[in-house]
Image (cartoon, grey):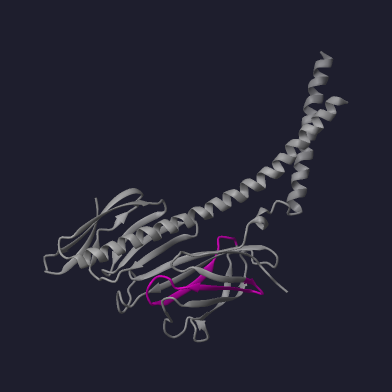
């Protein structure tokens, strides 16, 4: 009789534990997945603004001026490139699908070799120079 | 010998009964929809920080969302789409957009201008499928295609960008 009681109590405790554990794990997993993407967005926002602001500073500082930035690119970034000399674009691949984060620059002389699958710590050099066609440019280079 | 075999058989039979009871309980719980943990998740509208979601509502066959232009420049809206990963997917038959000068059916004859710092109201009407049922939790992805004429006029495929946001809400209904 006491064996049966012990077995039943064991099963009851196990069932109660699973009832509490499984929904909690599901909820926390969902929350952390969405929070992670919000963190990525926040990081990208910070990096993009930093690059654009420093590019503008280098531009107005004149030819030969240079700034080096150390940034941490989060996972989920497919590529980083410049469009039309004034848009810094981050292509992202997140759980909602492929999306883009774009930063508009006040200057229109940005150029950059596209970075594919960038991830992790990265050093970016922002350099103002005159190119072969005598045009004033601000170049973003990964070091 | 007989006692050992009897003990073994009783052991196996006991386990079989226990397994049968557990499976029956799981089936009943699943049938009564007690395993729907999504109802415990908060309602959310998440877009990128460049286009923060100001407000949203889901119900009466519609999905409405209010978004702010924080990208730092005037842009033109090229496309508005809504979908999700359910089967069948969420489909809305009509899209309306209000950039501040009245609600118009999207797409209008020319791409509407979205000024920097201004809000737009997007209304997806005639929504069905994809879990869009009264009282149920629906997850929808809204995609906005846009471009800036300051980069290129006319815009090209390269200067037209896509931003996506997610809305998770319980469908209201009357």
Q: Which residues are magenta?
A: B58-87
**Nearest the eye: A10 or B79:** A10
The dominant secondary structure in magenta is strand
Looking at the picture, tell me which residue is in the foreground, A62 or A119: A62
Q: Is residue B122 above or below residue A8?
A: below
| Residue B81 counted in the magenta span | yes
**B78, A2: nearer the viewer:** A2
- B102 left or right of A77 in image: right
B70, above or below A67, in the image: below
The percent position of residue B37, horizontal first and vertical second, equals 67, 53
Q: Is residue A138 above or below residue B77?
A: above
Residue B98 belongs to the span the image colors magenta? no
Q: What quarter of the picture does the N terminus of chain B occupy? A: top right
Q: Which image quadrant: the C terminus of chain B?
A: bottom right
How many labels were placed on the picture? 0
Indicate left or right for A65 with B110 as reference.
left
Give the image quarter of residue B91: bottom right
**Which residue is pictured at 68% across the width and 70% down the height?**
B172
Q: Where is residue B161 drawn, in percent x and y?
A: 39, 69
Q: Residue at x 79, y 39 (%)?
A: B21
């Amino acid at each position: 009789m006491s064996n049966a009681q012990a077995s039943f109590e064991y099963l009851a405790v196990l069932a109660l534990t699973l009832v509490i554990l499984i929904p909690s794990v599901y909820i926390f997993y969902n929350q952390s997945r969405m929070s992670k993407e919000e963190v990525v967005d926040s990081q990208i926002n910070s990096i993009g603004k930093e690059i654009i602001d420093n590019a503008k500073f280098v531009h107005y500082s004149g030819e030969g001026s240079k700034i080096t930035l150390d940034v941490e690119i989060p996972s989920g970034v497919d590529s980083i490139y410049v469009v039309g000399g004034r848009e810094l674009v981050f292509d992202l691949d997140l759980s909602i699908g492929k999306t883009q984060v774009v930063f508009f620059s006040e200057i229109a002389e940005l150029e950059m070799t596209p970075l594919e699958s960038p991830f992790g710590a990265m050093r970016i050099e922002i350099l103002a120079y005159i190119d072969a066609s005598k045009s004033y440019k601000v170049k973003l280079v990964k070091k | 010998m007989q006692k050992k075999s009897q003990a073994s058989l009783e052991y196996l039979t006991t386990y079989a009964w226990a397994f049968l009871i557990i499976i029956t309980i799981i089936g009943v719980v699943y049938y009564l929809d007690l395993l729907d943990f999504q109802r415990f998740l908060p309602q959310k509208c998440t877009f990128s920080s460049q286009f923060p979601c100001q407000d949203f509502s889901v119900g009466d066959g519609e999905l409405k969302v209010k978004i702010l232009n924080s990208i730092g420049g005037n842009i033109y809206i090229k496309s508005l789409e809504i979908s999700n990963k359910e089967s069948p997917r969420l489909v809305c038959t009509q899209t309306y957009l209000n950039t501040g000068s009245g609600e118009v059916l999207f797409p209008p004859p020319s791409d509407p201008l979205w000024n920097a710092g201004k809000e737009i109201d997007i209304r997806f009407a005639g929504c069905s499928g994809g879990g869009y049922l009264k009282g149920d939790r629906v997850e929808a992805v809204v995609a906005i295609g846009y471009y800036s004429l300051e980069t290129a006029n006319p815009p090209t495929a390269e200067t037209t960008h896509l931003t996506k946001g997610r809305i998770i809400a319980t469908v209201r209904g009357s």
